[in-house]
Image: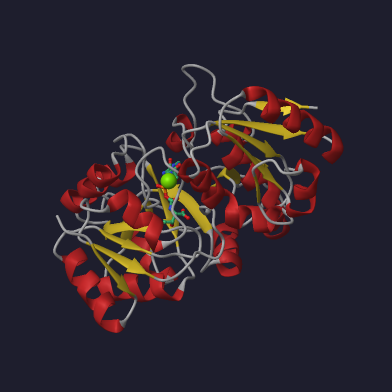
Amino acid sequence: MQTVLLKCSDEALNRAAELVRAGQVVGFPTETVYGLGANALDSDAVLKIFAAKGRPADNPLIVHITDISQIKPLISVEMSRMARRLAEKFWPGPLTMIFPRSPLIPDGVTAGLDTVGIRMPSHPDARRFIEACGCPIAAPSANRSGKPSPTSAKRVMEDMDGRIPMILDGGECQVGLESTVLDMTGDVPRILRPGGVTEEDVARVAGRCLVDETVRRPLREDEKPRSPGAKYRHYAPRGALTIFEGEPDNVARAICQCYDGCGRPALILALRDHVHLYGDRRVLAMGSGADEMAHLVFERLRDADDMGAEYIFSEAVADSGMGLAVMNRLGRAAAFHIEKV
Ligand code: TXA
Ligand code: MG
């Protein structure tokens, strides 16, 4: 299959929508990361997403909409007042809410779960794409399974060339990390995956917000997570990644020692203000705080691969606000190999 890469013109969006209506899969931009979209109500089309990604069949997909009126047929309950308030505040935007699913949703989308994740993206091209398709769009991140999520069309092409017919190029993703996945099936909203809408943001609107414990630690053997995606080693670069937590000077000293001693091609990921602590060692800046790190973390993990780094040593950031999402992704990429120094 030949994969065409097109800027998001009206013509390209119409061609993409035609493909989706014909049961195909199209790569498209969102404000979080690029997605691989297909008609969420077409079970054969949904299977093609899993094939293109090489995704395990037990990992459910998020369904994307552009208007709150589209949600009713997709879920089997009335949205609670709290859910409606969260939607008003954070949709369109980087928030996915989990509700009991309606029978309209094919089993393939929910991977057999009795719930479904719904998100309303804010990226104008994502919205134009979904509107042109005229159906809810099931979409995971547009990476091959196990690779970091792509934040530019070029990265989607690297993973999907020959596997899908079209990729829409809408420039770089603004947030850079996937949406917050918020379980709305209990009394208190629970973050299953941290993202652009933070724990503090949700708590401000809902009064309370839980953070699932698997956000901050690896799964135990045989543990069944609330979010199936937590089972898989995501976001993994080829090099062995270790995270160092502590005072900047201690962290820099420990990282330099490991870097100098490892005897293999290595790379350091550091906050911009700390780059000078690493002298002439190979170091890439990850921005100057959690928001910028969120934007850069996947790109830096891909850079590490491009640079042939066999060892990657990364600074940590405080795990509050956007820092929770950054540390969740970095932590998973490192299989939670975190050195406290
Ligand atoms: O920002 C995003 O959410 C991007 C863009 C494209 O919208 N999409 C995305 O999808 O990150 P994906 O498939 O890569 O990640 C979806 C995550 C997975 O960890 C999955 O297990 C979880 O959401 N998930 C989906 N439906 C769920 C459900 N019903 N219950 C629990 N977890 C669910
Ligand atoms: Mg993903």
Q: Position of residue 63 (x, y in %)?
A: 37, 56
Query: On the rendered structure, is 1 left or right of 310?
Result: left
Is residue 230 toward the left or the right of residue 17 in the image?
Answer: right
Q: Is residue 206 visible?
A: no
Residue 338 picture quarter: top right
Q: Nearer the viewer, residue 125 or 102?
A: 125
Does residue 11 sit above or below 83 in this rendering?
below
In this view of the protein, can residue 34 be seen by the observer? yes
Tell me which residue sits at (49%, 16%) in the image. Answer: 221
Residue 325 position, x and y percent, is: 62, 47
Q: Quadrant where the C terminus lies? A: top right
Residue in the picture at 33% in, 70% down: 130
What number of labels is visible? Answer: 0
Query: Where residue 10 appears, x then y in whole percent?
Result: 29, 83
Name the side, left or right, on which 321 lies relative to 94: right
Q: Quadrant of residue 242?
A: top right
Q: Is residue 267 left or right of residue 66?
A: right
> What colour-coding does the image apply?
secondary structure
* In the image, farthest residue toward the bottom: 10
Tell me what residue is drawn at x 79 percent, y 53 percent: 273
Q: In which quadrant of the rendered image does the N terminus lie? A: bottom left
Place of residue 327 in the rendered image (x, y in percent of width and height, measured from the top left): 65, 41
